Image (tube, rainbow, N blue to C red):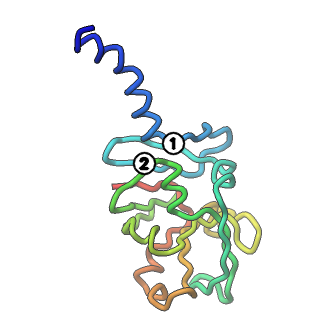
Amino acid sequence: MSLRRTFLLAWPAAALLLAARISPALDAPTGKVILTVESKPDGRKVDFDLAMLEKLPQRSFTTQTPWYPTPRTFTGPLLRDVLAAAGASGEQLRLIALNDYKVSMPAADSRKFDVILARLLDGQPMPVRDKGPLFVIYPYDSNPELRSEMYFNRSAWQLRTIEVQ
């Protein structure tokens, strides 16, 4: 068999393996899309509805924030798990909120700290009028370094899009 014919026969299988490696095995959203993760290097977009985010492992912690007068409990998937589910990797994240607020975050923050995309506040879904449906929250009380304006500014509420660069 010629090398060209071998390549042509092997190409479909190789393409499928490559696609499986870079594309996460996610169900298509069936509900309203509340988050889009866009990988800028390759232009791939992955949409999440609430059910998809709920299927990811959930993390809860109670922390004091500048936005509430008392410590509150936040629950949601880890940001690093959302990025992994989307098959997205990069060095910089651009967080974009429903009101078009934009902030940059080093992707390393998602690996170094247990940053969550909070979907629950004190066990209840967060409405848009109270910073929902998704709120990027650092575990501020776990590390004195996190109790600074820099990390507070990275906590985008009403998160809608994550651009991975």
Is label 1 in a helix, a strand or a loop?
A: loop
Q: Compared with residue 68, is residue 120 higher up or lower down, i.e. above or below? A: above
Residue appearing at x 45%, y 74% in the figure: 112
Quadrant position of residue 132: bottom right
Residue 34 as seen in the image, left or right of residue 152 = right
Q: Which quadrant holds the C terminus?
A: bottom left
Residue 65 as seen in the image, left or right of residue 20 = right
Q: Compared with residue 37, is residue 152 higher up or lower down, i.e. above or below? A: below
Q: Compared with residue 43, is residue 4 higher up or lower down, i.e. above or below? A: above
Residue under pointer 2: 38
Q: Which quadrant holds the N terminus?
A: top left
Quadrant position of residue 11: top left
Q: Amino acid at mark 2?
A: Glu
Residue appearing at x 59%, y 82% in the figure: 67
Residue appearing at x 49%, y 53% in the figure: 84
Q: Report x, y in % for residue 10.
A: 35, 19
Q: Report x, y in % for residue 78.
A: 57, 64
Dot 1 or dot 2: first in sequence order is 1
Structural crowding at the residue carrying mark 1, measured as other residues with C-alpha within 10 Å and reported as few (<14), some (14–19) or many (≥20): some
Instruction: Name the residue furthest right.
Output: 123
